[in-house]
Image: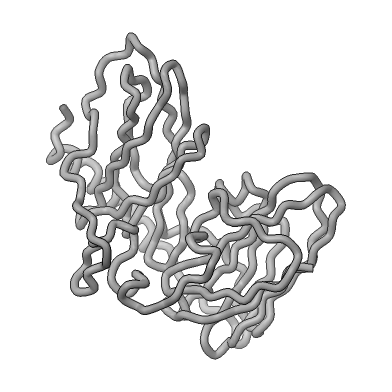
Amino acid sequence: MLELVSLRSTLNKAATAALCVGLLVGCKADAPGSKTATPVTDPDLAPPRAETATETPLNTVVIQGTAVSRKVLLRANGSGLSQVVATDFDGIFCAEFPLDDEASDTYAVYAVDDDGEISRPTTLTVAQVAAAPQPEVTACNDAPICKEEEVCEGDLDADCDGNKGACDTDCNGCSDDYFEPNDAPFSPPQVTPGTYALDVCPCNMDYFTIPMVKNQTYTVTVTFDKTAIDLDLYFWTQANAEAQNTTYAAKSVSTAATETFTYKATADGNYVLKVHVFDGTLGNEAPYTLKIQ
């Protein structure tokens, strides 16, 4: 059995090193009245360090590691199962996934920061092999007892939803709209042409799936009160959204109260729209209108 103390030491050194590297990246001020079209993945947000056995005779996969973030999002690419896990005070996390007999799956692990940004993934592949040796870690120990409501004092995630303190709707009083949860680019809710009255809560971004066929053209527009919040739009193919890369199909980045773009699909498939909250307004709750035509 892998010693937790040893794991903490090894993983925390890696996390600290990643953070130190991020702090060496300089900042550049934007010109008045403008902002740079920066990638939606923050280079200072290091991908999680994660580990698991590559082969297991069991029907459970245990993934553990550390992240310099308040929570991690884990996704089994084959089964489509996903879960959000809060990190402890040392940044350590642990998650379990089912795995069928003689099956293999690839797991993507993302760090999710207080501002709702998502890192690029760390990927792990595990195969169920009956003759494989027993893995050193077979379960996540000391699982937290989740409460129905968040404890707003301190830095705890009492209800185990991955949000702490002011970022939790139990504490900030924000009312999620009917599309929630849609804070990650993995199978977000589908929207079709129409007009939607929506709301963004503190520390969250909104993602939507827009299905398109080749040569179909849509104009996507969001309007909002720019004195309350600053929103931008990023649009990817589904694969690029899940990879959190900067290969956008379209985007709209400005300081205006309206963001809009028109896109003609180059192929059939699902596209992912991110309604991105720009720096400085991440802690605000604000309504916005999404229109697709």
Name the outermost residue toward the right: 215
The quarter holding residue 34 reads: bottom right
Q: Quadrant of the C terminus?
A: bottom right
Q: Nearer the viewer, residue 124 or 184?
A: 184
Q: Position of residue 87 (x, y in %)?
A: 27, 53
Q: Is residue 66 left or right of residue 249?
A: left
Q: Is residue 130 left or right of residue 218?
A: left
Q: Residue at x 50, y 63 (%)?
A: 180
Q: Quadrant of the N terminus?
A: top left
Q: Nearer the viewer, residue 249 or 36?
A: 249
Q: Residue at x 31, y 41 (%)?
A: 95
Q: Nearer the viewer, residue 265 or 255?
A: 265
Q: Is residue 45 left or right of residue 87?
A: right
The quarter holding residue 101 reads: top left
Q: Nearer the viewer, residue 237 or 175?
A: 175
Q: Position of residue 77 (x, y in %)?
A: 51, 36
Q: Is residue 150 above or below residue 124?
A: below
Q: Is residue 35 above or below residue 139?
A: below
Q: Residue at x 66, y 84 (%)?
A: 256
Q: Is residue 210 above or below residue 30?
A: above
Q: Is residue 171 left or right of residue 182?
A: left
Residue 69 appears in view: no
Q: Residue at x 48, y 75 (%)?
A: 279
Q: Position of residue 250 (x, y in %)?
A: 72, 61
Residue 155 appears in view: yes
Q: Position of residue 194 (x, y in %)?
A: 74, 69
